[in-house]
């Protein structure tokens, strides 16, 4: 059989053109969605009396056979059939004869491909919400095991104030919560059906778009046929949401790399999540964390690529839009790989509490608390800051820490100091003094974990509603 669109042509397509314009090498990943959409479309054609019921049944059976070939990897794709849509249609006609040619009635590849992409992303957004919630669970379990682990908190990567390690981990739970919310919000727009828009203007056949929407579980149909076939906002939105997830992961990766270094020794990643060196026998490298950090770049690149493809594109479909797929598919597999590794990597991470504790002892991260102590005694904060700055300088010159100073020494800097200063400077006290909503005090972190568990329940309910729906 020649090309499905061959009628108007008198010459064969140049072989290089065929190769250059084909998308089958990558859009075969949309095969299941393509058949899912076709089954709903042909069912509707039957219900609307556009295609006789016996033909509809033949086509449905034929599509089921094609699906089997695809699943058993027996399907042979051909570049000369350009893309997944024409490869499937051609195979259908090959299997059931010319009646297969009725499938494309009232449809264009333009609304077909858009439908495939919506179906594909809809499925993956649900998977990502689930993977993100599993990562949140791993982080929260580590947080719960570390309510009493105190670690220096940093600004400028300089020790700033002591915090609970649990508090640090819960910051990431909050980030991933926003990611989940964004993905859930994008689902509304992804779950809109383009099919029925035809090539761009609609169709002359009396189709029922809402019937197809209902069969496929779409909440609504596109309002405008031109917009339906031209819209790739939902892909940009996905790539942008994926970029934020990767950015969050990359920040955590950076911390894991730092924390597992000999200089820090705050954590140890499980052997199963590290690799060795081919030359240096002592090495245990945090490759997964590094690679996720590195792969963030390609996801940002995919976002930029998609935005640039769409810039200034006139309505409606343009072949440029075929470039929407590789970046999206690559992003889906990159994110999927990262998230699947991350949850167990966090769950198996060993936390070196003693080392963290030691780090807090040997620093000035309790300096703010002495300033606050003087403020509570009536000194304006700015003056207290100056007094403690001098006290810290004195300690640095003497090579000691604040807790090492005698009361006489403290009093040289301010007569407001008394015995109670030593209790104020203890790391537990410093941490628990920050008893403000969202702060690092143990009770606050426990409350935060409680709220995060409630959010997790809401995510689970959402997943229950959206998972494996079709
Ligand atoms: N392979 C094409 C794509 O991915 C399908 C749509 C083709 N439409 C067309 N008018 N050539 O964009």
Image (tube, rainbow, N blue to C red):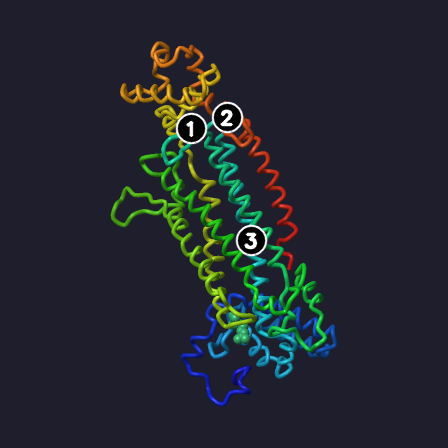
Q: Residue at x 55, y 82 (%)?
A: 4
Residue for badge 1? 161
On screen, residue 458 above or below 32: above
Question: Which mark is first along the chain, 3 or 2?
Answer: 3
Residue for badge 2? 434
Residue 138 image offset from top left, x and y in percent: 51, 41
Residue 233, visible in the rendered structure: yes
Residue 127 bears which disc, if any? 3
Question: Which mark is first along the chain, 1 or 3?
Answer: 3
User: Could you tell me how far apart the alpha carbons at marks 1 and 2 are, in whole angstroms?
Assistant: 10 Å
Relative depth, front residue between 324 and 39: 324
Say whether residue 294 is left or right of residue 34: left
User: Could you tell me how far apart the alpha carbons at marks 3 and 1 are, in whole angstroms?
Assistant: 38 Å
Question: Which mark is first along the chain, 2 or 1?
Answer: 1
Element assignment for label 3: helix
Element assignment for label 2: loop
Identify the image quadrant of the C terminus.
bottom right
Relative depth, front residue between 355 and 426: 426
On screen, residue 182 above or below 108: above
């Amino acid at each position: 059989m020649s090309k499905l669109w061959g009628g108007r042509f008198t010459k064969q397509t140049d072989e290089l053109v065929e190769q250059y314009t084909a998308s089958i090498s990558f859009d075969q990943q949309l095969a299941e969605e393509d058949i899912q959409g076709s089954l709903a479309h042909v069912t509707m054609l039957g219900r609307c009396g556009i295609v006789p019921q016996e033909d509809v049944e033949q086509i449905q059976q034929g599509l089921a056979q094609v699906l089997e070939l695809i699943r058993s990897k027996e399907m042979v794709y051909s570049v000369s059939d350009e893309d997944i849509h024409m490869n499937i249609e051609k195979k259908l006609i090959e299997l059931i004869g010319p009646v297969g040619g009725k499938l494309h009635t009232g449809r264009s590849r333009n609304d077909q491909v858009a439908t495939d992409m919506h179906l594909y992303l809809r499925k993956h957004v649900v998977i990502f919400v689930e993977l993100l919630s599993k990562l949140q669970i791993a982080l929260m379990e580590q947080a719960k095991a570390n309510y009493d682990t105190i670690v220096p908190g940093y600004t400028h990567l300089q020790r700033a104030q002591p915090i609970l390690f649990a508090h640090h981990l819960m910051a990431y739970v909050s980030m991933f919560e926003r990611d989940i919310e964004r993905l859930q919000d994008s689902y509304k727009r992804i779950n809109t059906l383009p099919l029925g828009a035809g090539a761009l203007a609609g169709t002359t056949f009396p189709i029922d778009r809402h019937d197809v929407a209902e069969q496929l579980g779409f909440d609504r149909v596109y309002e405008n046929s031109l917009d339906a076939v031209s819209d790739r906002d939902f892909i940009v939105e996905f790539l942008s949401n994926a970029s934020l997830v990767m950015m969050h992961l990359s920040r955590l990766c950076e911390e894991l790399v730092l924390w597992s270094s000999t200089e820090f020794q705050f954590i140890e990643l499980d052997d199963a999540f590290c690799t060795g060196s081919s030359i240096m026998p002592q090495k245990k490298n945090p490759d997964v964390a590094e690679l996720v950090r590195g792969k963030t770049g390609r996801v940002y690149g995919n976002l930029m690529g998609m935005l640039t493809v769409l810039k200034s594109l006139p309505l409606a479909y343009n072949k440029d839009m075929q470039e929407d797929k590789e970046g999206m598919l690559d992003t889906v597999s990159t994110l999927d790989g990262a998230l699947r590794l991350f949850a167990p990597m966090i769950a198996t991470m060993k936390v070196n509490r003693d080392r963290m504790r030691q780090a807090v002892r040997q620093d000035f991260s309790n300096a703010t608390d002495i300033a606050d102590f003087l403020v509570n005694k009536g000194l304006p904060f700015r003056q207290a800051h100056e007094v403690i700055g001098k006290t810290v300088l004195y300690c640095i010159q003497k090579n000691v820490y604040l807790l090492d100073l005698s009361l006489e020494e403290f009093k040289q800097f301010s007569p407001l100091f008394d015995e109670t200063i030593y209790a104020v400077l203890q790391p537990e006290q410093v941490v628990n003094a920050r008893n403000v909503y969202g702060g690092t005090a143990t009770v606050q972190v426990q409350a935060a974990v409680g709220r995060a568990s409630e959010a997790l329940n809401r995510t689970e309910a959402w997943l229950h509603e959206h998972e494996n729906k079709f």
